[in-house]
Image (tube, rainbow, N blue to C red):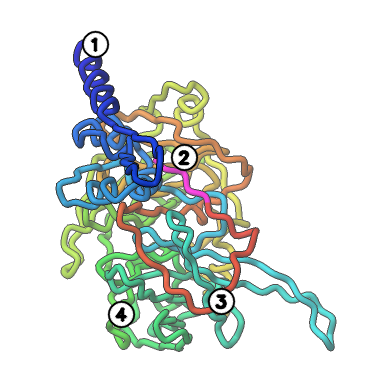
């Protein structure tokens, strides 16, 4: 209490030092000192900026005055707010640092056939600065309808690459690549060693940007990566045999997500069983400890649903008394159908997927913090304590986990190149839920 009183008295002392001299005649001088700039640095950083947990608010503070901008931009400024945001209420496809790749739908009728035609327009948006640019459509007009990813060259100047994964064969990777500097889509076909005789499809629509490359996790298969800087090759990272779905039993339904935390790629696996099975629902995390040698290790021992607890009673009851529920029509159904439409499905392959819960992402600074999607809510699981915490409620009754995109917020936001200078569509509003 005494310390707080001394801080207030010190602030009041500095405010009283502000001298405001009124202008009496033309010979008088007016010396107006800004009250905000008179605040001492310790009070400014400790009592004001350190209490801001949203990086957007800190960025706004840089516009208050030159002194504030200098303090916040200085290397000595050590402000580390929680930097993860999950984008929920727009149409995100992918993210790179603090930049989003979003889409907007529009419909038009043909002049001759009068048939209703659906068009998808892609945008690159920075939700902190609200800078954006519209991307050109692909020649075949299928932009945004296939798995897609956003990457960059690592500079603040804002050169981005958009990579769209097309239908692939067992030994060929087919891509459409857009360089924001050139502003034109280019088709790429890359030969690779086949690991499956019947083709493959990704488990997620959005690609994960890591080490300058975009990564897709193949269903019950390896990680497939492509870097725009190495246009004629791709990277195949195989998984351990213990990570294959068959290792959990024939009746197991495995839901998995590729994520990154603490500089390592990780796969979150939720393994669920029917009521008639002897298996126990659990969660496992696998960490890629050696990127080049494809060396994996299990990050944490399996965490069983029955051991999870929560202060919110319905969350605890839902997880401890979980009954497996699946669906054939889901967000990845049409992607799966397009990738496998020319080939018969592999033996044992099913379109069934778990509705809830769904693994979303690891926290970027702590791999033991896992975000899960439950019915109309997102929760945080701490594997160390096995405790679930409600993060936010979502109004959607259907599973939209394929459209939940992680984004890292930075105090020095990335710049967005503006090619066309068109107005932002009213329906493309960006919303971020900071966690």
Which dot, 3 or 1, sits closer to the camera?
A: 1
The label nearer to you, 4 versus 1, is 1
Spatial CA span between label 4 and label 2: 40 Å
Q: Which mark is residue 1?
A: 1
Q: Residue at x 22, y 51 (%)?
A: 262
Q: Mark 2 = which residue?
A: 277
Seen from the viewer's position, the closer of residues 33 and 166 is: 33
Q: Magenta segment range?
A: 431-435
Secondary structure beneath label 2: loop
Residue 308 against residue 377 in the figure, above or below = above
User: Mark 4 or 2 closer to N-term?
Assistant: 4
- Residue 391 sits in quarter: top left
Question: Mark 4 sits on what residue?
Answer: 234
Residue 117 falls within the magenta-colored stretch: no
Residue 183, given in percent of the width and then of the height, sits at 46, 84
Q: Residue at (43%, 51%) from the top-left corner?
A: 254
Question: Is residue 432 in the magenta section?
Answer: yes
Tags 4 and 2 touching, CB below 8 Å: no
Indicate which disc, 4 or 1, sits on the residue closer to the N terminus. Answer: 1
């Amino acid at each position: 209490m005494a310390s707080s009183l001394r801080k207030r008295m010190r602030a009041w002392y500095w405010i009283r030092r502000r001298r405001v001299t009124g202008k009496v005649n033309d010979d008088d001088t007016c010396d107006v000192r800004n009250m905000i700039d008179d605040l001492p640095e310790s009070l400014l950083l400790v009592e004001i900026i350190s209490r801001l947990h949203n990086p957007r608010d800190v960025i706004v503070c840089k516009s208050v005055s030159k002194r504030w901008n200098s303090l916040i931009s200085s290397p000595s400024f050590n402000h580390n707010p929680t930097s993860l945001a999950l984008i929920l209420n727009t149409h995100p496809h992918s993210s790179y640092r603090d930049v989003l790749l979003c889409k907007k739908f529009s419909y038009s009728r043909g002049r001759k056939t009068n048939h209703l035609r659906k068009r998808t327009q892609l945008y690159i948006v920075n939700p902190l600065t609200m800078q954006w640019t519209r991307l050109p459509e692909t020649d075949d007009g299928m932009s945004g309808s296939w798995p897609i990813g956003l990457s960059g060259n690592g500079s603040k100047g804002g050169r981005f690459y958009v990579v769209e994964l097309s239908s692939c064969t067992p030994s060929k990777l087919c891509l459409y690549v857009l360089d924001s500097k050139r502003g034109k889509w280019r088709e790429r076909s890359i030969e690779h060693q086949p690991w499956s005789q019947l083709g493959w499809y990704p488990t997620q629509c959005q690609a994960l940007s890591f080490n300058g490359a975009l990564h897709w996790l193949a269903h019950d298969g390896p990680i497939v990566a492509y870097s725009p800087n190495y246009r004629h090759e791709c990277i195949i990272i195989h998984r351990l045999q213990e990570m294959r779905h068959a290792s959990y039993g024939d009746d197991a339904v495995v839901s998995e997500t590729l994520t990154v935390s603490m500089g390592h790629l990780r796969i979150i696996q939720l393994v669920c069983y029917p009521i008639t099975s002897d298996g126990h629902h659990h969660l496992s995390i696998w960490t890629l400890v050696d990127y080049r040698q494809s060396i994996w290790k299990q990050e944490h021992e399996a965490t069983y649903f029955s051991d999870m607890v929560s202060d919110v009673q319905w969350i605890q009851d839902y997880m401890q008394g979980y009954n497996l529920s699946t669906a054939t029509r889901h967000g990845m159904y049409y992607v799966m159908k397009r990738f496998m439409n020319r080939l018969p499905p592999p033996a044992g392959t099913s379109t069934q997927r778990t509705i809830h819960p769904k693994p979303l992402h690891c926290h970027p600074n702590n791999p033991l913090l896992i975000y899960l999607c439950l019915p109309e809510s997102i929760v945080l699981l701490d594997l160390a304590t096995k405790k679930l915490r409600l993060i936010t409620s979502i109004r959607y009754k259907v599973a939209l986990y394929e459209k939940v995109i992680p984004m890292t917020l930075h105090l020095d936001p990335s710049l967005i190149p503006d090619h066309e200078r068109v107005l932002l569509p009213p329906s493309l509003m960006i919303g971020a839920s900071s966690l």
